[in-house]
Amino acid sequence: MRIMKLLRNPEIKRAVLLFGFVSILISVVLWFFLHGIGLLVGLCGFGIYTLVYLLLTERCYRQIENLTNHLDGVMHGEEDGLLQDCTEGELAILHSEIEKLILRLREQSEQLQSDKIFLAESLADISHQMKTPLTSIHLILERLNEPELDREERRRMVREVVCFIERIDWLVYALLKISRLDAGAVQFQKENIAVGELVQKAVEPLAVSMDIRGILWECHISDAVHFTGDLKWSVEAVTNILKNCMEYTPEGGRIIVDATENAIYTGLKVRDTGNDIPAEDLPRLFERFYRGSQPAGGGIGIGLSLSQKIIQSQNGTIRVRNHPEGGPEFEIRFYKGVI
């Protein structure tokens, strides 16, 4: 039955007809020399050879059929592994290559599903982060329409509206930068950067706020400490870390920065004298929109995530721990080789 099914393939039909034609020619030649016995030998040889060919070909086609059925199952979501009955030859190579392709496609499918979930969660987080200040702005604007408000109260409310708008502006700004980094659309420069210059540029936007709050600034960095990276993006990353330290440092506290360089990496440490980070917050501190169990200031939990993304994109690492003397300590390492 399977051999008859095999004959549906046109290439098999052509092969059988060719064997028959050749066998007839051989039989005629043998009959000329051996008469009747020659014809019998030729026909028997044709039959045996054709049968062996069909049996071997049927085995090969059965393997191809099994592989086809399996691929059809994979396309419909079945999760069983590939058949492994091909141990040698081109068919075994085909099995191996198709298995690699299926594994790769499954990895991509899982990644796409993960990206979908992450996108949905991110959109929900963004919606929540945008909704809070927008709702506050709406309520304040309604209050501003009340005629009995005095001038000072109106000014205070306008300042609140400005703060909320700045918060939304920062959220959009940070998300756009993270999306560019996620998409691999950022080309980082390879510059020789003095870490002291990097930290000086990073602290400039925060200098006034730190002075108002009486936070002392200590920087212990040698002029000889350098690393290779993108100055603009690195300043962005360090500024976000310093801003986080400033928000959690009490008035009169200190922010201490120091750096070292060795043959493997250039290290930068930033710590403050605020309270220790709770143990349950340490593993999640760089997650997007995570503000910790004890949030402070008007942060939205995206600055540290952006910093981590920038640092990792420059062959670097960042981690945070609680310093033995108290307060959190961020440690950045820019490696000089691929890690």
Image: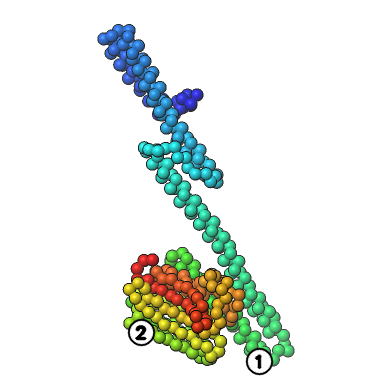
Q: Amino acid at mark 1?
A: Glu
Q: Residue at x 40, y 22 (%)?
A: 51
CA neighbours of label 2 inside 10 A, class few (<14), some (14 to 19), many (20+): some
CA neighbours of label 1 inside 10 A, class few (<14), some (14 to 19), many (20+): few
Q: Residue at x 64, y 79 (%)?
A: 137
Q: Residue at x 35, y 68 (%)?
A: 337
Residue 15 shows in the view? yes
- Give above or below for 92 relative to 278: above
Q: Tell me the residue that label 1 is attached to.
A: 152
> Which quadrant of the figure has residue 149?
bottom right
Q: Looking at the image, which residue sits at the far top?
A: 35
The coloring applied to the image is rainbow
Q: Residue at x 37, y 71 (%)?
A: 335
**Residue 128: x and y, percent?**
62, 70
Residue 165 shows in the view? no
Query: Do residues under tags 2 and 1 come within 8 Å of each other at their CB atoms?
Result: no
Disc assigned to residue 222: 2
- Residue nearest the viewer, comparing 85 with 6: 85
Q: Looking at the image, which residue sits at the far left?
A: 33
| Element at label 1 | helix
| Element at label 2 | loop
- Give above or below for 169 relative to 68: below
**Residue 263: x and y, percent?**
32, 73
- Residue nearest the viewer, comparing 228 with 17: 228
Q: For the residues carrying marks 2 and 1, which lies nearer the camera in this image?
A: 2
User: Which quadrant holds the C terminus?
Assistant: bottom left
Q: Amino acid at mark 2?
A: Ser
**Residue 58: x and y, percent?**
44, 29
